[in-house]
Every structure is written in structure tokens, then in C-alpha cells.
Amino acid sequence: MINIEKRTLANGLRVVVHVDKSTPLAAVNVLYNVGAKHEQIDKTGFAHLFEHLMFGGSKNIPSYDEPLQRVGGDNNAWTNNDVTNYYLTLPAENLETGFWLESDRMLELDFSEQSLEVQRKVVIEEFKQHYLNQPYGDIPLLVGPLAYKVHPYQWPTIGKDIAHIEQAQLQDVKDFFYSHYAPNNAILTVSGNVDPDQVFKLAEKWFGEIPKRKIAQTIIPVEPEQTEERQLRVERNVQADTIQMMYHIGGRKDDDFYTCDLLSDVLSNGSSSRMNQSLIKDQQLFSDVNAYISGDHDPGLFTVTGRLLPSTNMEQAEKAIKVELDKIKTSAVSDYELQKVKNKIESSLVFSEINFLNKAMNLAQFELLGKAEEINNEVERYREVTKENILDRAQKTFRSTNCSTLYYHSKA
Amino acid sequence: MSLNRQSAPDFKTVDQFNLLPIDTFELDNGIKVHLLQAGSQEVAKIDFLFPAGSIQANKSLLSSVCNKAICEGSKKYTSSEISEKIDFYGAYIGQQAQFHHAIITLISLTHFLPETLEILEDIIKHPTFEQKEIDTILEKRKQEFLIEGDKVKTIATRAYTQNVFGKEHPYGNYLELSAFDDISREDLVDFHKKAYIPTGTHIIISGQPGDKIQQLLNKHFGQQWSDASPLKDRKPEPQSEIKKNIFIEKADALQSALKIGRPLFNKLHPDFHGMQILNTILGGYFSSRLMTNIREEKGLTYGISSFIMTYKHSGFLVISTDVKAENRELAVKEVFNELKRLREELISEDELTLVRNFLSGDVIRNFDGPFATSDNYRGLLDLDISPEYFHDFFDKLMSINAKELQVLAKKYLQEEDFITVVAGK
């Protein structure tokens, strides 16, 4: 059970505190409710570019990293389709430094041409390093537009086109800041060796005077139901063929999120899972297989991937995966199998509660999705899933008209 | 009252570092057990370190394939029964083959340890090594090896270590494709018999394994199941011809991978702690000289870092980055400029304080809790170093001055001692 205390400041900033006295450290996590899905189709990659700019200095503090390192702290950030998340850890007695730094960059960034110029280049190099100069690196660029026709999940966080980053102007950056970065669009979580009263006092002191801002109400188009099977075939200079099949499912807040998660676990979590045993061990068709859900806030994807052994061709591979999916939609999983994946979830939740920074990040997500306290009901949500739920979910999901497949062929 | 946002709040520097106590005891057969009992969760992590690394194996792939295949079937349980049971208990088994040890890690909820350790005993003592399982592992490894070989970063890393340690010694990481066809079941059976033995084996436990852990371990691993002595250790031969510049072309590469480094020493060298601090200043944290110059000022790369790698018998320092071809020369030039600055200019008090404070916080992070501490402690076992070593580092961090760092830079950061490897364009 994770202890939680919460307040909301007058400017709308939600503050969540979790006390963990087993560490001498503290974590400060600031989640902004802005991600790649809030971008315009002709200005993609902005949320992520912006994450880089948040380290270029703020109104009153020329450097973000240095003062934090000076008090023994460290930090990083990540951006996904839905949110941008900043986090730092430091010795708990220096907690106030974290508040000082995070509040100043929420108050106002130092919008400088120079910082924008450099970070544009850095992000372009990041784009090349991760997406263009790696075997299979372009898969995220290919699958989005295949599975989504109107929803912004069609582009990856790094952006749809490198040109959008190249063309980013300082005014765009300012507009983006004032329409998304605001106390009323953020969640502050603090965890570790801290005193909740002191945290609330510090929150009031440093964040209390930041004005509420008008948040841009991005109208995010709803993805219409897919009605035809989609396929994309590419050929690349890689050593092995891979296949990736994607099925539309619901979003993070949908009732059957936990059912979907367990469905993917039955298929591929752990070496005893169905696809591992059948496709890798018994039939020896693949060197690697995976099934996972995206966990996106809006309706997301159930993805199945496989890397083919040299002796397997694409038709065999696809057929073998479909046989597994057919099985799980034809007959219910056994009680034992369901119990097994639930046990695995429960122990992984116990393991995830060891790390105080993890807890700060997870609490922020739960607070954004509804309320932080829900974190303590997760085990129960998983326990409630029945084998009938899984069967029903499998039948609704694994239909050919709900499927987009990427065939990634090796040229050799 | 208006808030002064321009000046930083008061802070305290970390001036001491408390290491979790590490208890040691021996099982009935002499296996050394290191216990870090702490944490709020009823979970334990148990590392078994067998003297079964690639150096003892003395044949490419033997150690890593053996350590993987060991979990794919035993006298009592088939491969799928092992995974069924381990998954049902919500436990994890991890495997890692290193140069001097093969490691098998069990992470388990404490109340399932009697069951999970029973399975592990059979895995470790009585693997069946079925040919089919071995083939599956080899096919997967071969494919991964080929995929990795397309990455400029991997091409450069392999060329760097081969250049420094030679093709003959495992530290060189040299592997030929034909090695995948040259591993037989007999090799594994023979190696397992000689290397998964009580003598030379260590067990590290972290978390909350319960009060009965010593009994439990004795029950499953305390008997003298083999009288063998560990296989021979082997030091790398000094390389007569280390090339200063290596360029490996990959025509379709969008970026080139750079590795610029020099051979160094192991953890016992008296300059080791000082070099760790100097390395941090050079490229070991976000505000390092290299990050500031090459990423934050010039935007030449997504990231650049330097790190020191140590093994039982040796070590090296290497600077690593990916840049586009037209920026390559400038990046290399700036790397050497930064080495020169460290040799020629004294580090300012301000920068030294910054790195000292950052690193002291980092020490607290790296030793926060039993699991993090055990990961660090594991690195000391090859050389039989006591945990006091971590305090020595902390003391050096508190006391080192700019002059000392400059002496180290003059000794170890001379341009002519560095090797430059480029893979790409």
C-alpha cells in the first residue's frame, strides 16, 4: 500500500506526496499534460523538442542542470504521445533546490534563439541516431500512419518529418509554452524521505504565485473504426525479416485495459507464455516474439511482433501467429494460466514499489488519469479479470479488419 | 513577501556516505555468501557467480551459451516446466556471462524462495543440455550477432577492444561467424562439469530473504557436489601493435560512431579513484566538458560521454559518440582540445566543487538500497576487494584538488597515447 497525501493549489497545480523513509533521497516529478498528440500535423515533434528546450535556462536561472548537480542532484525527462514528464532526484535535505528549479521553468522559460538553434541540431542528430541509422529504426515511422488515419498517434514523438524540427521558430516555441505549460496543466509529485507538510509549504512558496494559464484546447480527432485489413511491405538492408501486427483496442481509462494487459501477458510475458513456447521453442519459426499493449491514454494498439529465423518465410510466420491468436479467441484460457499471469503482475507490482522515483512517476500518471489513490487498486483491477473477459476481448480484437500488418523484409 | 528567484536556496553538501552493512558467511562446502539485508519489500535477489566466465571457457561463445542453456531443462524438470514454475511463482531468472564469472540471478518473492531455490538447485547441478535447446539458443545468438554488426556503434566498439586486447583474449571481444557452428553439446557438458562447482563460487543476496536463508542455501547448495578446482585464469598478452587510427567504412551510414580511448588499469591501481573523478569532469555527467562543448554549444551530436571500463586484469578509458560525417573531424578535434585543456589548465575551484557535489550525490544514488548496493559490490569480487574501497573513493572525492587532477591529466590524457576508431563515413 502506497501512502499518499494530496493538495491542489489555488492556481490549479495538483501536488501529490508519497513518503518513503527507506531512502535518504527525494524525487520531484513534474508531469505536463502535453504530448505529441497535442501537436498540429504540420508542426510535429514539438512536445519533444520542447522538452530539450526546458533545459536551456529559465527566466531567473540561466542553467538548469548546474545548480541541481551542485546540490548532488540528477535529472532527466521523457516525452510520449500523451504527456511530457520531468524528474529529478537529490539528497532529501536539499529538496528546496528542486522546487526552485522546477517552479522557475514553469513560470517562464528563457526563450533564446541560441538555445533553439542548438537543440534543433541535437534533436536532428537524435532522429538520425535512433530512427535512421539503426537496423529496424524506422519501424515507428512506418507503423503509426498504417494504424492511424486521423488520430495524431500516427506520428512518433520525435516527429513525422525532420523538416518540422528544422523549421521550428522561436514564436512557435513561445506559443507552445504558454498554451501548455501551466500549473493548471501539470501535476507535481514528490516522493522519498520527505515531510508532506513541508512539501505543501514549499509548493505554495515556489509554485503558488505562478499564474493560471489558458490551456489550448486541442481538438484531437477520433480515429474511426478500421473496416479493412491493412498491409505494408518494405524491404531494408537488415539481417532478418520481421513482422509487426497491430490491432486497435481501447484507451488507458477503458474498463478492459487490465483485460487487454493480461491477454498480452498470456501470449508473451515470460518464457512459459504461449507464443514463446509455441513459436520459438516448439515450431522454431522465430528468434523473438512479443505481444504488448501501447498503454496510450486514447484508444491504442495491441501489437504482436516477431523476428523470423532464416528458414522461416513471411507467410509461415504470419500464419503461425494467427493460429495462436485464433486459439485464444476460440477457447478460454485455463484457470491455472490466468492465475499465473496474475501472479506475475502482482510480483512485478511489488518489485516496482521498491524504487521511490518509480513511485513518483506512477503516481503522477494515476493522478492525471483520475486520481493518484487508484494506484493502490491496481492489483484488485487485475484480480477481477475473468477468463470470459479475456476470451471476449480476444474475439473483439483479433479480427482481420481490425489489423494492420507491417512486413519488414530483409534485402539479402 | 516577494520571492527571490535569482539566488539558489541554501543547501547542504553530502559529507559522509553510509554503506549498508554486508555480512559474509560460508556454506558447509565453503561457498562464500555475501548478504545485504535491507529494504521494505518482501523480495530477495540472489546472484550466483560461478567461475565459468569466457576466460575459464577458453572458447568463443562457450561460457554464454552454457550459462543460457543451463536453464533449459534439468534432471527433474523439462525446459517448459522450469519456465512454467518460475513464471507461476512470479519470479525471474536472469543470466549473464562475464569474462571471469557466469552469473545466474534469481529474483523472487521471499515466501516463494523455498520453491524457487529448489528449482534452481536442479538447474545448476543437473542440466540436461538437450541439443534442440542448444540449437535454439545458437540460432538466436547468431542472428543477434549479425544484427548488432550492422550498427556503427558496435562495429567501432568491437574494433576498439580487438585493437587493445587482441583477438586471442576474451577482453578483445573477437568473434567469428564460424564459432556458432563450432559449439557442441559435449563442450557444454564438459564445461559445466568443470566450472559450475563450489570452489570459487560466490552468492550475493540482497533484500529481505528471511531468517532461514542460510539453512535454505545449505540445503540446496551446501553439499560438496564437486571437488574440482576452478579452471585457469588468463591475462591478456601485451599487444605489440596497437593501431593509433582505425577507420571502418560503412557506406550507407548516416552517422559515424567514434571511439577515442586509451588502455588503462584495473581498480587496484592507486590512480584509479582520481581517474574516475577526472573522467567525470571530461565526459561523465551532463555538465561535463565534452557534453558542454560538443552537444550544448555546437549541437554536433545527441550525446557524448566518456567512461572507464575495468576488468580483473586491465581497463580502458573511452570517449564515445555518434556524429554526422561532415562533423566528424570537428568533433575529433574538439575531443583532443578538451584533453589538452585538462592537461594545461587547472580546473577552477567552482567546477571542482560542482563535480564533487554531483558525484557525492551520485554515490548516494548508486548505493541507495540493497539492490543497487549489491550491483556495485559485485564488481569488487573479481579482485577480492573489500567494501572499504567505496569509502576510499568517497574520501578521495572529498580531498582531491585541482593540482592532483592536472597531474593525472598529464600522466594519462596525452594525445599520443590515444586510439581513434571511426565506423561509418
Image (cartoon, helix red, strand yellow):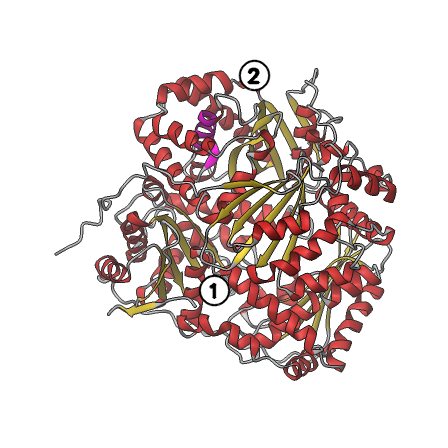
Residue A125 falls left or right of residue B395: right
Residue type at mark 1 is Glu
Q: Residue at x 29, y 56 (%)?
A: A103
Asked whether residue B399 is in view, the answer is: yes
Q: Residue furthest left?
A: B1
When asked about the image quadrant of residue A151, the answer is bottom right
Residue B416's mark? Answer: 2
The reply to whether the magenta stretch includes residue B418 is no
The answer to whether residue A34 is visible is no
Numbered range of the magenta stretch? B273-284
Q: Left or right: A248 with respect to B394?
A: right
- Callout 1: 10 Å neighbours few (<14), some, many (20+)? many
Task: Please indicate whether residue B122 sits to the left or right of residue B367 in the image.
Answer: right
In the displayed structure image, the side of residue B165 where residue B394 appears, left or right: left
**Label of residue A39 in the image:** 1
Same chain assignment for discs 2 and 1: no
Choose between B153 and B387: the one closer to the eye: B387
Label placed on residue B357: none
What's the amino acid at mark 2? Glu
Chain ID of residue with mark 1: A
Pick the quarter of the image with the C terminus of chain B: top right
A263 above or below B17? below
